[in-house]
Amino acid sequence: MDHARPQFTIDASIRAFSSLSHVDQSGKASMVDVGSKNETKRIAIARGIVQVNSVISKLIAENNVKKGDVLSVAQLAGIMAAKRTSDLIPLCHPLSLSYANVLLCLNEELHRIEITAEVRCTGKTGVEMEALTAVSVAALTIYDMCKYAVSPKSMKITDIELVSKTGGTKGDFLRN
């Protein structure tokens, strides 16, 4: 059985038009060289939601989930994920973070956990992926810790997005 991967080529005119930043001249994925970029202070904030049902919401509020303190464990998992983003996302540069935090707020009225991550560094590339990874892993941790209590269809991870970023040559971003 031949396990060779099919070779894809990209027409040079299409490549020039699209200016793919993470693709080399042969069309293969490659890491961007940030060596000539200036170091600047970089900050990114991301958020997301884990929608749960009233049973899970009550268990979390009372700290009665069998696997332990959901919000504290998810916070630590998110921080750890921010620090390991380059191990998880193939073309991300390893960064020396100066700050990473994940805040989790149980909204008992709406039966959801609202997650916000903030990541900072002084470097040559941004920390958007680190903030988004922190939120994603915190959400997955909540899901994992609570899945025993109810059917998986009772939980939904949603609305993971970048809220803001500062620093870098492309300028600042703030979601309205």
Image (cartoon, rainbow, N blue to C red):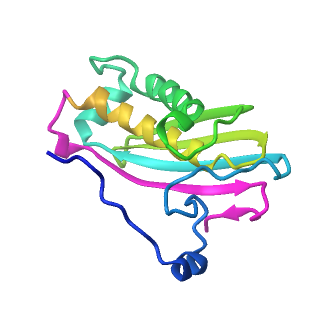
Query: For the point 56% across and 37% down, which residue is it?
Result: 86
**19 versus 41 height, above or below:** below
Query: For the point 52% across and 24% down, which residue is it?
Result: 76
Q: Picture coordinates of residue 65 (x, y %)?
A: 29, 21
Q: Quadrant of residue 146?
A: top left
Q: Is residue 80 left or right of residue 4?
A: right
Q: Is residue 56 left or right of residue 152?
A: right
Q: Is residue 40 magenta?
A: no
In the displayed orientation, state which residue is furthest to the front: 2
Find the magenta span and give its range.
148-176
Q: Quadrant of residue 102?
A: top right
Q: Picture coordinates of residue 45 (x, y %)?
A: 63, 49
Query: For the point 75% across and 39% down, which residue is it?
Result: 121
Frontmost residue, 125 versus 120 = 125
Frontmost residue, 52 versus 91 = 91
**51 versus 98 height, above or below:** below
Q: Is residue 96 left or right of residue 114?
A: right
